[in-house]
Image: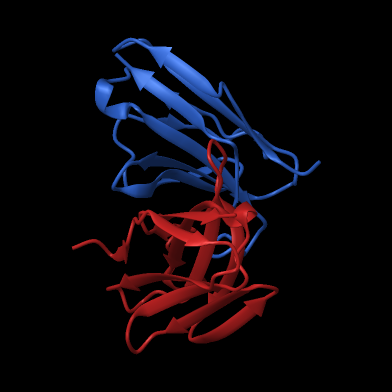
Chain colours: A red, B blue
Amino acid sequence: QKEVEQDPGPLSVPEGAIVSLNCTYSNSAFQYFMWYRQYSRKGPELLMYTYSSGNKEDGRFTAQVDKSSKYISLFIRDSQPSDSATYLCAMSGGVIYNQGGKLIFGQGTELSVKP
Amino acid sequence: EAQVTQNPRYLITVTGKKLTVTCSQNMNHEYMSWYRQDPGLGLRQIYYSMNVEVTDKGDVPEGYKVSRKEKRNFPLILESPSPNQTSLYFCASSPRGRQDYEQYFGPGTRLTVT
């Protein structure tokens, strides 16, 4: 069983839709939860991160972490064609676990927003 | 412009021919790391470096070497490449103490070993 599971999609939605992306994980030691966006032929770029449980909002993007269920989500409101990319969830144990900045990534979900 | 650069971006080589992929960052970051990205497996860490002359293995270090002689550079060395090292490689860097949640990635190097 992989430590982090993410539905690879692809996911296709019309412009303006609300998008929900999800990951589940098995390692209860994870403390930091991140979402990266990767455009075609580019490196991943950090969208947002959350420490421990709770919600975080940044413009049209909202990240949620439920540690009791080992489940994280990214919501995109009013989706735009420019949001079309692969979205990667990533997790880490944090400095107290001395894992050397090792991020554990999900497989990525490919999102296409149609005009 | 603050960035992580990698060279070459694309490389086709043959089994056993030593190669080096360079990585450089201009953000004065202490932490640097190498990942490989494979379909169905996501990104996996190969090696990382907490600072100059300090390196350590990640999850998939076999067949790779690294060195960190300068803060800005972190080359990845494949001494005897094999076809199972065909992959997309990313270098990443991070400021001190933030490597667990804030890593900046380079554009990637697509390597094919025949």
The single residue placed furthest to the left in the displayed view is A1
Side of B50 where B12 appears, left or right: left
- Residue pictured at 32% horizontal, 19% vertical: B81
Quadrant, the C terminus of chain A? bottom right
Side of B79 where A53 appears, left or right: right
Q: Is residue B77 above or below residue B42?
A: above
Q: Is residue A4 above or below residue A58?
A: above
- Residue pictured at 46% horizontal, 58% vertical: A88
Q: Position of residue B89 (x, y in %)?
A: 46, 35
Q: Position of residue A112 (x, y in %)?
A: 49, 53
Q: Position of residue B58 (x, y in %)?
A: 38, 48
Dividing the picture into quarters, in which one does residue A4 lie? bottom left
Is residue A20 among what the camera can see?
yes
Q: Is residue A111 above or below residue B97?
A: above
Q: Position of residue A108 (x, y in %)?
A: 40, 55
Dividing the picture into quarters, in which one does residue A56 lie? bottom right
The single residue placed furthest to the right in the displayed view is B1
Is residue B78 among what the camera can see?
no
Side of A31 where B4 appears, left or right: right
Dividing the picture into quarters, in which one does residue A37 lie? bottom right
Q: Is residue A60 above or below residue B100?
A: below
Count of numbered marks: 0
